Structure formats: structure tokens, C-alpha cells
Amino acid sequence: VSTQSTGKKHFDFLATLNSKTAEEGMDWSSPEDRILALQMCIKLADINAPCKEYELHSQWTERIVEEFYQQGDDELSVGMPVSAYMNRAKDPPKVPELQLNFIKHLVAPLYHAMASSCLVPGSWVPISEEEEEEYRQGSDLNCAQPTIMPHTHKFVSSLQRNLDSNYAVWKARNEVYQESLKAKQAEEEEASNGLLVEESVIVEEEKEE
């Protein structure tokens, strides 16, 4: 199964669940809805590493990076083009950037949809109107906030806490990583400019001779 096909199915399932949640909700007497719920549970079980505590989440992240490189090694060994981010010799592991995108665009929307449909463990706790406004504003990971019961309750889950916490960790690390890339680029440009100046001086000296 191709990555493109798998991604399409993921978003198709997600769109179907969001549509049901926004309209009549899940009909547990319907075999189709029960199958959809099971499909979504399998999906979240497959990609839910960012919903775990950081120590465990980071271990899975390291394994995925190595799995990517192993796939690249296999592709290289049979003469195939190496997939993006999988070339061990050329692609540094852009882990913070990749994890941010993975969480924001895949894991968090899936968690949001399932939490809003009451398909993940957690509880609805009462909140005041002031707390509701703060909750609605959310954080950097707004798409992970489950739909709220108007003016009454919010959904609380350890999965949500871990997701928010891990996203914040990767965001901070990505900022450091991006700054290091800028510093490296500046060093390379400075070295390149210095080389050009040196070559220019040599040319001038040769002309004088």
C-alpha cells in the first residue's frame, strides 16, 4: 500500500467521523458506525506515540528515524531512488520539524475528532464561562482541543496533556534547530565570500606580474 493511498484513507476516515460528530453523532446501532469507530481506534493506535509520556514517545521517535534510514538503505541497495528524509548519508534527521508537522497535521486532528466523539479515555469536567473562553482560545495546538459542551464542560485526558506537552517540547527544539541552520548557512556564506575575495586577490596579483 502506497503512502499516498494510506494518507488519503486516513483523511477520508477523518472527514467521515467529523461529519458524523457535527451532525447526528455516532449511531451505535449502525454496523457502519461501529466499524468506523473501530477503524479510527486502529488509526490512533498506529500513530499515537505523541500521545504518550515524553520518555516513551522519544523512544518511538528514535525507532522511526532508524526505520526511515533502513528503508533508504534498502532502496539504495536495489538501485531505487531514495525517498525523502531517508538517505542516511545526505539527510540529517530533521526530527523536531518532522514531529511538529506529524503532530499538528495527523495526530492532533485525529485525536480531536475521536475525543469529540467520546472514543478516547477521559472525562468531561465542569468549567466556568471564563474558563471556557480560555479553553476555546487553546494553545499552539488548537486542533487538538475537542469540541466543547457549550458553557458547561471541557474534555480532560492524559492523552491530551501528553500531546500538548510533547508538541511544546518539539516546538522549542525546532526553534533551536532552525537557529543552528541559520548560523551554519551564515558561516558557509562567509567562507564562500572569503574564498571569492582570496581568488580575486590572486587574479589581480597575476595581472600585475
Image: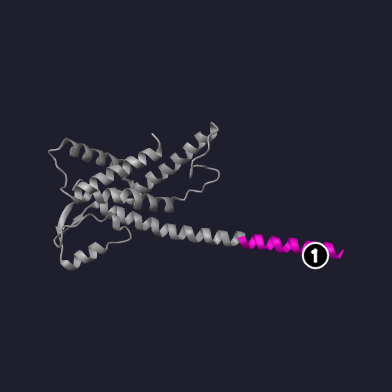
Confirm whether the magenta stretch covers residue 145: no
Query: How many circles with numbers are drawn on the protein?
Result: 1
Q: Please rate how many residues cluster around mark 1, counting C-alpha atoms within 10 Å: few if below 14, some from 14 to 19, many from 20.
A: few
In which quadrant of the rendered image does the C terminus lie? bottom right
Confirm whether the magenta stretch covers residue 191: yes
* In this picture, residue 135 sits left or right of residue 64: left
- The percent position of residue 21, horizontal first and vertical second, equals 19, 49
Using the rendered view, name the quadrant where residue 192 is placed.
bottom right
The residue lying furthest to the bottom in this view is 130
In-front residue for pair 183/53: 183
- The percent position of residue 127, horizontal first and vertical second, equals 15, 63
In-front residue for pair 13/52: 13
Residue at the spot 15% in from the left edge and 60% down from the top edge: 150
Q: Is residue 121 visible?
A: no
- The percent position of residue 40, horizontal first and vertical second, equals 25, 41
Residue at the spot 17% in from the left edge and 35% down from the top edge: 31
In the rendered image, which residue does mark 1 sit on? 204
Magenta residues (range) = 189-209
* In this picture, residue 91 sits left or right of residue 31: right
- The percent position of residue 154, horizontal first and vertical second, equals 18, 58
Q: Amino acid at mark 1?
A: Glu
Q: Main secondary structure of the magenta part?
A: helix
